Image (spheres, rainbow, N blue to C red):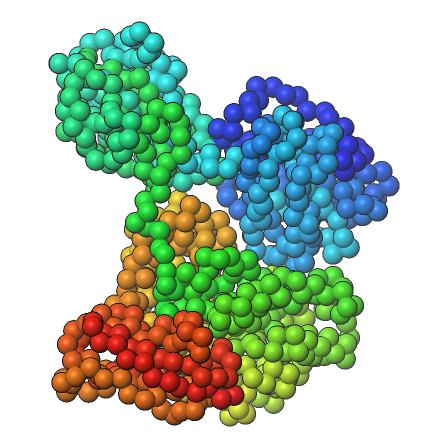
Amino acid sequence: MNTFLTLFRHKPIFIALLIGISATGNAQLVTNGGFEDSNTGDITSTSTKGWFIGIASGINPPPVFEIVNDTVQQGTRALKVTVHGLGTNNWDVQIVADSIPVRQGATYNYTVMGRSRKRGATVNFTVGGYSTAEIKAIRPATLSTAWWKFSMQFTVTDSIKFIRAPIHFYGTVDTGNAIWIDNLQITELNVDKKPVIVEAESGNSGSNFPILQDSTITYVDVNSNSANTGNPGDTSRVITYQIQFADSGMYNLFARVRVDSSSGSFFYGNGFGSKDETLSSDWVTVDGLTTAGFSSVDDVVDSPGSVGNGIWKWVNLTKNAYQGTQGNPFAVSLDSLTKIFQIGGGNHGLDIDKIAFCKSTLYYTVGSLDNRQLGIADTTTIYKGPALAAGQNKFLGCADDNPNNNFTKYWTQLTPGNAGKWGSVAGASTDTAQWNWSGLDAVYDYAMNNQLAYKHHTLIWGAQQPSWISSLDSAQKVYYIETWIRMVGQRYSNIDMVDVVNEALDGHNPPDGGGSPARANYENALGGSGTTGWDWVIWAFTKARQYIPNAKLLLNDYGIINDSTATTQYLVIINLLKDRGLIDGIGVQGHRFELESADTNTIKNNLDRLAATGLPIYISEFDLGNLNDAGTPNDNQQLQLYQKIFPILWQHSGVKGITLWGYIENQMWQPTCYVLRLDGTARPALLWLALYIKNNPSDIEKTATRIPSNFELEQNFPNPFNPATTIRYNISRTSNVTLKIFDILGRQVQILVNTKQSPGQYMVTFNAQRLSSGIYFYQLTAGNFTETKKLMLLK
């Protein structure tokens, strides 16, 4: 390909044809954002539908832009870019999403998926006007060999009607590399929460489904009664619509109808697409609407309703059978936002004004449906805290590179995701002064400021390493790896735990240069197999002990507790490290592909085998969602998996903490595994998890069967203490019990117990590792009983 078009960063050539584009904010605004409307093969001209390519003069050999179907994030197409030569500017090689309609003052969400063949490739994701400056950018976006979502939000402040979204490919790390881009989306903020309203008369109507008028309302009603049961019978009684959605997800179907005294009926398609008008399984029947629905502006259209005939009213067709058959929610995927939908005529007497598709996680009033306003989140599914495992002797944490103020509502432990990996810090530079610690600093500082346990992930791994490490000689490799470990220890002095070596087992991700794409290659420089078979792992733990002496050192790997053979192999390394006093805990990943189909007895038995070492076990990367992570996120399937797997892990005495690998919608590498929606509502799995942990506390040990005659709070022991002490208390009758820690100024610093307890003697461990030396108070409240005692922390 020899494409030549010089594009300036702020003043590019405007070459797009503006055909049929409307800045309504009703849908995905990027034309062909997933490349599904492009043919596979090289892009031999300067553009493909919705995009144009810019390559500055002098780039030789030129990059190759092609549409592929073998490496996609979703759908059947993606863009592949292979960079061979570089220019002097970041934007000398770029592809631009063109002619994106916007409104002044509106805020938009931008998301895009990216990955690369070699780790560490960098691109810029940007948006800007045609004659105005750049609006927003993710610069740089560092890619890995797995698909990763990049997101930003921007507001249009200028009076412009169209913007563009260039993607720049640059930096020596990209040379000869392949980069894939998929599913660029730009949507107006909250547009996904608005009803998708379709006027009933706007479709392609059959001859027996006339368009009628009543004052200002245009509607449809079949002109005769159906001779069929369960289906329209022929195409003359069918209306076909083409509907454009703003977002993927699950949708419920609503309709605005009026029923006359004869009580009409109609059918709608059982799912999207064209239906067989004579096949009853293709259709859902709606009947008996004479006393159903809602008409008052503030009524929530959810239950069947009770409005009489002769009145325009809204009905929720998905949630109610209405004397017919109850349908299922409609699934919309990211790569197919345009859908065909059909309705069919039943008996005459049912007027249809509008149909509406609305997000199934939200509630809609008559007013919001009439005026296309935002749906309402179910406030009963907004979890308000405290953290799910607050006050317990096991943590429940999460990996997050951008924790916000809500993080502490849910979690008591924090792990960086990509930010903690050497490739993210060192990037393309061997100059340690140029290493970028800002992302990791932010995660660590958040943990320290919020008194969260902090686990560093990870020091040694074959993946996501600096692009230059494999090309060095052995002495240089050892120097830089030791420098990396030393700098982590010096910079983050309060690390609680660290994954020293990640995925060491053969065939996983050791730094041996194997695999495709090739892993980093420095295992032999660290000693290779050596005399133990795992000398390189022992070297890494020795250096971690030297430079990070106060942290618990962990080994971490996947496919362990679901596989007895892997557990046996894992124990070989663990025991070698244990014999040398180099390991403090066992990390076991808990991804859905390991656990969703695992035998529960196998999981229990392998946990027992690991616990027999005497080392604590940490479930390090827990996520569950759809089976195979396929399809639209299914709440019930995720809930069932949580109920099956989580109790096995939480109740095991050897497991001392569980870390979810992300929790927010659109921010997880396994897209169906999030537990918190973007609107702040919790999926059923998260609500169940909060209730389960509350009812199954891990840190409260009932120490005797004798029923005490009085409430009593004992003095902690030892006292003074560092960093942990034991608090005992007696409960004489079933009560709501709290045990809280306060500082000398009366500020609450920790909740140890907050649950209902039956009569008995109890013992709780208070770990004050995060607190400073000084005098503290602990207060027991049980019903009307309250007692406070003093304790002293000396470090």
Q: Residue at x 51, y 80 (%)?
A: 772
Comparing 635 with 369, the one in front is 369
Q: Is residue 251 left or right of residue 233?
A: right
- Can residue 515 be seen at all in this image of the molecule? no
Residue 526 sits in quarter:
bottom right
Residue in the picture at 52% in, 77% down: 497
> Residue at position x 43%, y 87% from top?
792
Q: Could you say where residue 738 lies in the image, as x and y percent from the top left?
A: 29, 72
Residue 283 rendering spot, x and y as whole percentages: 25, 27
| Quarter occupied by residue 545 | bottom right
Decide which of 390, 594 is in the foreground and name it.
390
> Image height check: is 723 above or below 49?
below
| Residue 399 can be seen, yes or no | yes
- Please say if 109 is above or below 232: below
Question: Which residue does the image show at 56% across and 33% down from the upper left?
Answer: 106
Which residue is situated farthest in the front direction here? 745
In terms of depth relative to the viewer, which is nearer, 318 or 138? 138
* Residue 91, horizontal then vertical, whole percent: 76, 42
For the N terminus, give its image quadrant. top right
Above-or-below relation of 769 to 660:
below
Residue 425's place in the image compared with 460, above or below, is above
